[in-house]
Structure formats: C-alpha cells, structure tokens
Image: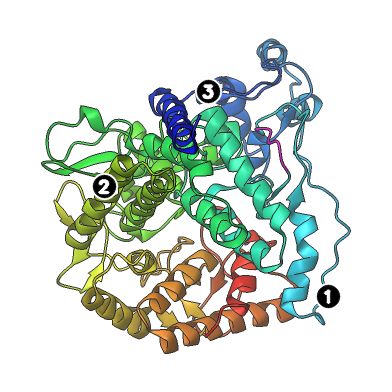
Amino acid sequence: MSIKDFRFLYILLFLVFVSCYQESTSVEEQIVVDENFRVNSDFYSTQLFEDVQMAAVFPDSKTFADAIPLKPIPAILDLYKEKKNAENFNLKSFVSDNFKSPDKPASGFVSDTSLRVNEHITRLWPILTREEENQPEAGSLIPLPYDYVVPGGRFGEIYYWDSYFTMLGLVADHKEGSVRNMVNNFSHLIDSIGFIPNGNRTYFLGRSQPPFYSLMVRMVHENYGDSISKYLPQLLREYNYWQKGSESLINVGEANRSPVKVSDGLILNRYFDTRTGPRPESYKEDVFLMKQANRDPEELYADIRAACASGWDFSSRWFADGKTMATIETSKIVPVDLNALIFHLEVMISKGFDELQNGVKAEEYAEKAEIRKEAIRKYCWDEEQQVFSDYHIDSGTVTGKKTLAMAFPLFFEIATPDQAEKVKETLMNEFLKEGGFTTTLVNSGEQWDAPNGWAPLQWITIQGLKNYGFHAEANEAKRRWINRNKEVFKKTGKMVEKYVVTGEVEEAGGGEYPLQDGFGWSNGVYKALTQLKD
C-alpha cells in the first residue's frame, strides 16, 4: 500500500469514527458505580432531601448535596419513611447516622505572607489537586480517571470553565502533566457522558458551562505540540451537544435547549439546563425565591439553572428589571460570550479537519464560524451604546446592558477595528477601576455585578485589548489587577474567588455563599498575567 493510499484509508476510518460520535445520543448518567449508593436525580426529588434542605440542617445547601450515604439509598429512604413521624425523631441526628459530610482534605497548609504571590501559588497547587478516583466513594461525585485541580473552598470538585483559567497558571508553572490530566479528564467526560457538565457531580448532569474545551485543546496544541485532530471527535461531540435541538426550530424566536432561531437560516445559542425544579446544591435558596417571585415555578427554576450554566450566577445581566433576582430571564437571552466561544469551537473543528486534509469538512466549519462572526457583529452590537451586548429573543434586539462580556468579541478577534475601538473606550472610561475591571456597572448585591471583579474576565479583557493593539490600556489594567491581588494577599494571606475592584481593599461579597479562598482561577490568571509580555 502506498503512503497516499494509507493516508486515504486513515482519513476514511477517522471520519467513520467521527460520524459515530455525531450520531450518538448523550447518555447523561452513564457512570459505573454501585447504583444503590449513587446519589442521582431521583434522590433529589425525595421527601428526605427536601426536608433536610428546607430545615437548613446544614448552613450551606451544597453540603447535603455532596454528602456520602453510609447505607444504600433505598434503605435510607425506607428508614426515613418509617421513623420520621416518631415523637422523638430528630432530623439532624438521622442525617448524621446515615450520611457522612463530604471530606475536606486536611492539608496542614499555612499561608506565609512574606512570600511573593507567585511562590504562594506554586505551594498551593498540591493542596488544590485531587487524585483520580479508581474506586470512588458513593455519593454525588462523578469519578475521573486522572488527577485534577479544584477551585478550593466549598468547591471540592472540578469545574468546567474555571479549569481553563486554572490551567493558564499550570502552563506558566511548567506543570505539563497537570495540564494534560485536566484535558484528559474533560475528554473522558465528553466520551462517557456526551458533554462536559458544570462540574463532576451528578446534580450538574443537566447543564454544562461556558464551552472552553476548544481553548484547552488550543492550549496543548500551542504549548506542547499536540495535533488538533487528536481531539476532533471530542470537539465535534461538544459542538453537537450545543447544537442539539436546532433541527426542530421552525419560526424565528423559537428555542430548543441551547439553539435559538434568530432569523431565517440563522441559529445562535443560549444557556440551558435539561433538568427542572430547584437546584439540589441551592435548594432552599431557590424555593424561597420562588415563593417571593410570584412566577411560574418551573419557568423561574429554568432561568436560574440557565444562569448557573453561564457561570455568571448571578448578575443583573440576566434580570428583566436589571435589579432583582425575581425577574431573572436567562432563557430569553442569547449571550454574546457564549456565541463567541462557539465561534472558536467551529474554528478549531475546521482546523482539525484541515490537519486531516479533509478540505470539504474544513470549509464547512470555517463557513459556520464566519456566519456566526457576522451574526455576532450584527445581532450583539448595541449601536446606541457602541458596545457588544446580549440579544433578547422576545424583543429581537440587544438588551442594552453593559457588562464585561463585551470583551469576548475582542478576545476571539470577532470585532471589527471600529467596534474594538468603541469597546475599548467604554472599558477604560467606565469599567476600569482602582483594582481592575468591574463586571458590570450595577450594584445589585449579586456577586457577578459591581463592585466585584473576577479573574477570568480580567484575562479575557486584557488579552482582547492586546489583540487590537491597545497595549498601554491592557498593561494598565494588568497592573491594577495584579496590585489588587497582592494587596489582598498581604492583608489576608489568601488568593480569593473574586475581588472588590473599587476603592480601597475590602472583602468581596454578594451571592449565595461566603467569599471562598483557594482559588484556582485567581491563581492561574495571576501566574499567567505576571508572565504576559507588555
């Protein structure tokens, strides 16, 4: 067989393999463990789960969602049914007898504020690393075959979009093995479940998060020389997950799962969750909001869950009145950042096919990317405010809300030079504060609003500015964010999940839980920014 014939056969076999990925359906709970001990979606709808969460047996709702059953779940449920009405029944004692709280590995770690922040972060990587689970405990944790780095604090599992920004720091610290482990774990999740869930917990199996897998592939391609085509089956399956449902859309304004028909022949995407009801990890919070909101409960829960899929949980960005959580309407919004990420996914799929010398498929996905680029420029451009914004399905126009998501078209080089110039002006004049870029201009009390700044959005915005030649502006923003991180570390000995970027140093707040330290993506972005050339 000649080399030419061999290459043709290889490409043919590969395409057959890819077609199997494209045609397979997602199996959302394809996890091999003892199902008697596996905490799955059925358990979250039981009377026991509801009673424990609504009684606030644990201050943090996530604790019970992560708890490990000490007996088979059916046996615990039968016992609860038998005992709960007894005169001396104590719910907290019952939970203690039948469940173990999730482990928080004892590290013995003591922060040393005399160290430089980069040295502190290097010391933290082992503390934030979890070993692969070959024989996992029962509970809600989905086993992963490779070691992985978690954010820290209450977040003791892997998280999808967090991980990309954490990996930036691992690359900067020359931890190739850790980077590869992270990519391999996400590839495993795509292969075994059909998509990458929000995190490796069974209660996250209804939703994903901002799709950064294609950027992880680009990371190992650019830093370690991996071919893009090596990951092409997973890239395609990721893409198909986000496009599933598009074939059923007929009329403009219709949506199914993620796809939304914006105009004849044009499909864009929104965030979604296939599951219903209150989130297990925030059960009582969702129920309390439902009782206050005077809305259809399932519609409200769907919008809450979709906002969690966005990673921006929560923000005035998703609120109809721009102020209050009760008006959340995430399902009606086509986010500019999500569509920029899917644009990049289409570009990477095209490059993967190009490596295999499949020009037809490479051109097909390049054309999809070009169509999406033009659509973002058109449908997500706020002509009045001269910034990128989200598109509202019902109104057929932009939401008019200014958020740091406007930087994503710059990061992915989607914006025209004129659009980039206008966005730069808004970023520097309105969003850049003493400690970096604020997430929005609204102080709603939610964590993804002012006065908070978040590491991933600093990276996206700074790199986006650099892409269009705004180096002085990018360097000033970098300097302010790094200095704010240093100030907080010297004051507290911690790298934290989010930072107040206005005024003097103070502890960030807002949201459903206290400020968390650790912290994966803050570590990663700090490391990467300190190595980023001016």
| Horizontal relation, residue 58 to residue 26: left or right | right
**Mark on residue 435?**
none
**Residue 217: % across, % down:** 52, 51
Span highlighted in magenta in the image: 142-146
Q: Quadrant of residue 4?
A: top left
**Residue 95: % across, % down:** 74, 28
Question: How many dots with numbers?
Answer: 3
Q: Secondary structure at mark 1?
A: loop
Q: Quadrant of residue 249?
A: top left
Please tell me which of labels 3 and 1 falls first in the chain.
3
Q: Bin the neighbour count of mark 2 within 10 Å (Cα to Cα): few under 14, some 14-19, many 20 and up.
A: some
C-beta proximity under 8 Å, tags 3 and 1? no
Of the two numbered discs 3 and 2 in the rendering, the one whose residue sits closer to the viewer: 2
**Residue 442: % across, % down:** 36, 69
Q: Secondary structure at mark 2?
A: helix
Nearest the viewer among 160 and 413 is 413
From this view, report whether residue 446 is shown above or below residue 468.
above
**Amino acid at pointer 3:** Ser
Q: Bin the neighbour count of mark 1 within 10 Å (Cα to Cα): few under 14, some 14-19, many 20 and up.
A: some
**Amino acid at pointer 2:** Lys
From this view, report whether residue 5 is shown above or below residue 512.
above
Please tell me which of labels 1 and 2 falls first in the chain.
1
Q: Secondary structure at mark 3?
A: loop
**Amino acid at pointer 1:** Asp
Q: Which residue extends farthest right? A: 108
Residue tagged 2? 368
Residue tagged 3? 45
Residue tagged 1? 112
Q: Bin the neighbour count of mark 3 within 10 Å (Cα to Cα): few under 14, some 14-19, many 20 and up.
A: few
Nearest the viewer among 292 and 263 is 263
Q: Principal SS element in the magenta part?
A: loop
